[in-house]
Amino acid sequence: MVVDTRGGRPPRRAALAGIPVPRAGRAAAPVARALSPRRPARWTQRYRAGLVASDAALGALAGSTTLILQPGGALPPWIHGWTPAVLLLLWPLVQTLAGSHAPRYFGAGSEEFRAVARGGLFLLAGTSVLSYGAQLGIARSFVLLTVPALTLATLVTRFCARKWLARARGRGRCVKKVVAVGRDGAVADLVRRLQHDRYTGMDVVAACVPSPEAAVAVPAAGVPVEGDLGSVVDVVRRLGADAVAVTSASETAAVYLRSLSWQLEGSGIELPVSPGLIAVAGPRLHIRPFVGLPLLSIEEPVFAGWKRLLKTALDRTGAALAILLVAPALLGIALAVRLSGPGPVLFRQQRVGADGRLYTMLKFRSMVHDADDRLADLLALNESDGLLFKLRRDPRVTPVGRWLRRFSLDELPQLFNVLGGTMSLVGPRPPLPAEVEHYDSSIRRRLLVKPGLTGLWQISGRSDLSWEESVRLDLRYVENWSLALDLLILWKTAAAVVRSRGAY
């Protein structure tokens, strides 16, 4: 800010910005804050203290193991005996500097794990530079074994801590109280998403909408409307909220959002903002300055190139290895299906694959041989809200088939589809031709990639999902697919199959 030293009126730029400029010879008054600083929640302090303690314990354990396995000295002689104490203090410090103890990453997203890996990389690089530059004589085993093993162990403990936190949040503990701001429908949609994804730890306790008296969707979602957009700070103060979630709307555009951020500044209250971009994930979003104006850049989804070739190679290699591993189970299931009644062992059905191409999907037969002929008699009992036919207690399912469906064992033959290239290990749910006939242009984007043996729908509830939610998950995968996402889904599929939630 520029002040006129001649004692005249303050520059017009400062006046327009609403910033009080002191007169000559007077001290500047402190800026009044709308909200006083908040102390972090107790559970946040305890959880962070637990992470620091576990990092210290792992550091001491790694140092002690180094002493036992390398009595000759992995570190210089003058510090070798202090290796456990050095790592006990150094490892938590490195992780703090890398940001893995930041509360905003607790329980959601992958940034916490990336921060842990970044801390290990910092220690690895720092040790290497010091060893070479100062000629400290640090053993290669410390750089190549101790630090990577310590990083891996920390990642495992973080994963276990996150699982504990997810279970606690499922019981209503360790959550942040959130005030949602925006239009009635957008806030209601946000409330439903957060209620479904309890692991995020965000509990919407109130809402502020442009017209509180006309709000219908938010109260229907079980959240009270406490005021309009101008009363957000008062609502936050009264309810002791920890975050203000702003949905995308013209009423919450740049000017309002900037003013709200100024009012929350210094209070420690989080301000998450929805960019209004459905199914677009973080890796495709980038903030780029343009002539002093920050613009949100959205990269195109990648459906070709080396990543797709690598995905295809991993699919076929993984399918081949899986077939070899489960070959005895395939034979046993085939025998059980053959003995369960008349009909073929394998059920073949036309499905729609990538780019709308038809292919024959394989499954173990889980119904009676004339199931298609009986379908017309059951259509009136359909429990689905979309294009699919779902019936929790379908009388056509055989006893063996019910057991196979419970653990998704009837889908194992689809490994041969993956091996043949018509399916992928991870992808959208394989649609029927009758479904695709009713797709609009947005839902047809599911056909840009191969259907999957598993996917976001598999780990999110399977048959318990509504049609709208199933489509949303498939589109989310199509728009943001990556090898890392595929590996994460494969990891979570095992737990989903064991729980057998939504399998019928």
Image (cartoon, rainbow, N blue to C red):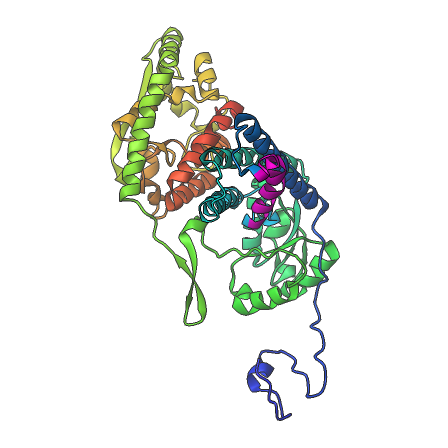
Q: Is residue 104 visible?
A: yes
Q: What x and y, as percent, mark residue 165?
A: 62, 37
Question: Overall secondary structure of the magenta stretch?
Answer: helix
Q: What x and y, as percent, mark residue 14?
A: 58, 81
Q: What x and y, as percent, mark residue 266?
A: 66, 62
Identify which residue is drawn at 29% across, 34% down.
Answer: 312
Above/below status of 421 relative to 6 = above
Identify which residue is drawn at 34% across, 27% down.
Answer: 318
**Residue 397 shown left or right of residue 46 in the figure:** left
**Residue 42 shown left or right of residue 423 in the figure:** right
Give the residues in magenta: 78-97
**Which one is nearer the viewer's eye here, 431 or 314?**
314
Q: What x and y, as percent, mark residue 146?
A: 50, 34
Residue 86 lies in the magenta stretch: yes
Identify which residue is drawn at 37% across, 43% down.
Answer: 478
Quarter of the image where one finds residue 285: bottom left
**Which one is nearer the viewer's eye here, 485 or 221?**
485
Residue projecting furthest to the top: 339
Q: Is residue 383 visible?
A: no
Q: Quadrant of the N terminus?
A: bottom right
**Residue 342 shown left or right of residue 73 in the figure:** left
**Residue 436 shown left or right of residue 145 in the figure:** left
**Which one is nearer the viewer's eye here, 123 or 365?**
123
Residue 264 lies in the magenta stretch: no
